[in-house]
Image (cartoon, rainbow, N blue to C red):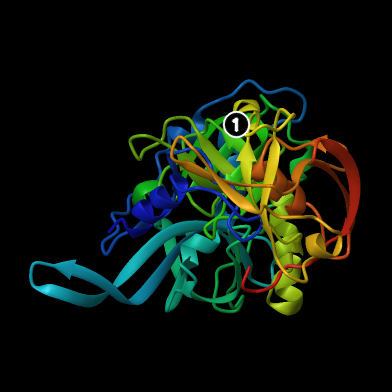
Amino acid sequence: MKRLWSSRWAVATGSAVTVLVVVALMATGVLPVKTEKTTVVREKASEEAATTTVAMTGTSMTPAQIYNEYSAGVVEVLSTFNNVSSTSPYGQSSSSAQALGSGFVVSTDGSILTNAHVVSDNGVRAHTVKVVFKTQSSSGTDTTTVAATVVGVDATSDVALLKVDPAKAPALDPVPLGDSSAVQVGEAVVAIGNPLGYDFSVTSGIASATNRNLQSPNGSVIPDGIQTDAAINEGNSGGPLIDASGEVIGINEQIASQSGGNQGLGFAVPINTAVSVMKQLQATGKVTYAYLGVQGQTITSDIAGTLGLSLKEGVLVAAVSDGSPAATAGIKGGSRQSDLQGQVYVVGGDVITAMDGETLAGMEELGAAIMKHKPGDTVTLTVVSGGKTRDVKVTLAERPSSS
């Protein structure tokens, strides 16, 4: 079944209005890379794929070396969702569905990172989660399946933490974690996972871009995403994106596609974000985020000119939540509506054009900027109102659970 395909497609074509409530969405065509199906076709990974060599220098490893060294730490994640509703010519029915994804071991205590959307669907956690390890036996390559516990799920970053009992699992082989802030465009990377049910496959490519704003399952912005042309397909979701030194720099999370398949546009959650989330999940079982408390709309120079605003771009503040940091700082929302070729804009309020001196092109950038901060941080917003520009200091709060 393709429930999340249609769900993410619908989200990707929606509109954006609220920072950390409903943020600016990515371009049409962004899809998740998890596969859901009741039957999984499993075949051994191609030996040829692991021998592809990418030109590297220094102490860099080839894709074959990375695969041989670290694939034992990559797992297949099988999630079962019960009471899944579906419609047929015979009416409404309820059944179970299986979701396939990937993950990787990060600690010998049995901790495994994966994507939130692999083990959760629209806020509902999977009924059961199992992980499959690739093992070696006297007869060759084999697999071992172990039950996993979901320690925590964070839909905002699309990161989930699983735990297996080391006593019941094969010898755990953690994959080294790197520093996603040091990723350079053009450097060689490999992805290991279970695309389309073909377990423990490896693909290679480069880091095509950095600092991409990705869309999370709940519509929030994941900043600093890594773009890669390493082939990523449904089922790769949750698996590691590894650099040439053999360290994980990201968790493969989504693809941009018009066909539903790989088109050289894959995206990964930065490992620095994943590690921060993991530590909070381990400590408290939940993740906290900074909160500003505005609802707004992206405006371009053309829209600004039509609305009579003397600026090039920014965030048109439509409303401010009562008691929020924005309200406390005196940020004002709009007072009337203006219809511009069928698109309604709420005007009369402030326009936010920058944060801490960094220009904001729109809601997506504002959402990403807030995501990089913690509750209690103080930021400076550049605000335009009535043709005048002023700087406003705002102390961010913890985002309410309903936001």
Q: Name the one closer to the observer, 16 or 217.
A: 16
Pointer 1: residues within 10 angstroms few (<14), some, or many (20+)? some
Locate residue 74, reporting x and y percent: 55, 55
Judge left or right: residue 284 versus residue 379.
left
Q: Name the one closer to the observer, 184 or 122.
A: 122
Q: Is residue 182 visible?
A: yes
Question: Which quadrant of the figure contains the C terminus?
Answer: bottom right
Please name the residue shown 50% across and 33% down the image: 265
- Identify the amino acid type marked 1: Ile
Locate residue 212, reporting x and y percent: 64, 38
Locate residue 287, reporting x and y percent: 71, 69
Question: Which quadrant of the figure contains the N terminus?
Answer: bottom left
Q: Is residue 188 above or below residue 318?
A: above
Which residue bears the numbered disc 1? 303
Q: Is residue 247 above or below residue 129?
A: above
Instruction: Name which quarter of the figure residue 130 lies in.
Output: bottom left
Judge left or right: residue 95 versus residue 341.
left
